[in-house]
Amino acid sequence: MVEFNNQLLDSFSEINKAIYKLLKKEADQHGITVVQLKALYRISSSPNIGLGELSEKLRLTNSTVSGVIDRLVQHELVERVIPPENRRSVLIHLTDKGQELLEGIINEDSLIIKKIKYVMELPEEEIQHLMRLHRLVLSKLTIEEE
């Protein structure tokens, strides 16, 4: 049983490592970090996102994400916008430069996009089965907040 548990955990670890390597290669080629790349992608897919929501989506603390955003602002890839209707909130937007960078990373020639396409060539029922298994495993591994 212990051997099976190790195989299962090793499998998840290897998949996670492979994805990270792909993301790191893309990020490195564009002079940003993996976390910055993930932040740019999340901001792009959720325009007008706030820091708290972005932190949740990235599964990082507000202070960590705030530092990431600071560096992205310095590189003119994102901007903080204070909406006139709620001066206490801050929304994060991609700049044109940030959008161009992201489009340069996420395109048909991108290694990570090519690799994801290979995975998506699996039969639909296999992908659906994999997603059901992922949700089941995640539900078993998740610690319930009290």
Image (cartoon, rainbow, N blue to C red):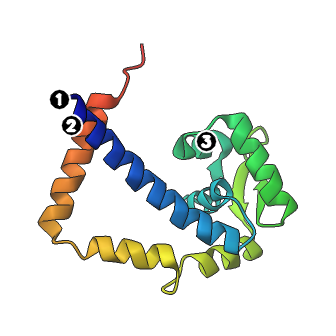
Quadrant (top left/top right/bottom left/bottom right) for the C terminus: top left
Query: In the image, 120: left or right of 85?
Result: left
User: Dot 3 corresponds to which residue?
Assistant: 55
User: Dot 2 corresponds to which residue?
Assistant: 4
Judging depth in this view, the residue of 10 and 52 nearest the camera is 10
Which residue is at a point 56% across and 64% down the rendered structure image?
23
Q: Residues within 10 Å of mark 1 (few under 14, many from 20)?
A: few
Kindly report which numbered mark, 1 or 3, lies closer to the viewer in this rendering: 1
Residue placed furthest toward the top: 146
Amino acid type of the residue that numbered disc 3 sits on in the rendered structure: Ser
Do the CB atoms of the residues marked 1 and 2 lie less than 8 Å apart?
yes
Q: Residues within 10 Å of mark 3 (few under 14, many from 20)?
A: some
Residue placed furthest toward the bottom: 109
Amino acid type of the residue that numbered disc 2 sits on in the rendered structure: Phe
Residue 46 at what x, y percent from top left?
55, 58
Do the CB atoms of the residues marked 1 and 3 lie less than 8 Å apart?
no
Image quadrant where residue 3 sits = top left
User: Dot 1 corresponds to which residue?
Assistant: 1
Residue 52 at what x, y percent from top left?
63, 39
> How far, Cα to Cα, is label 1 from label 2?
5 Å
Q: Residues within 10 Å of mark 2 (few under 14, many from 20)?
A: few
> How far, Cα to Cα, is label 2 from label 3?
34 Å
Under circle 2, the secondary element is helix
Which residue is at a point 48% across and 72% down the rendered structure image?
112
Disc number for residue 85: none
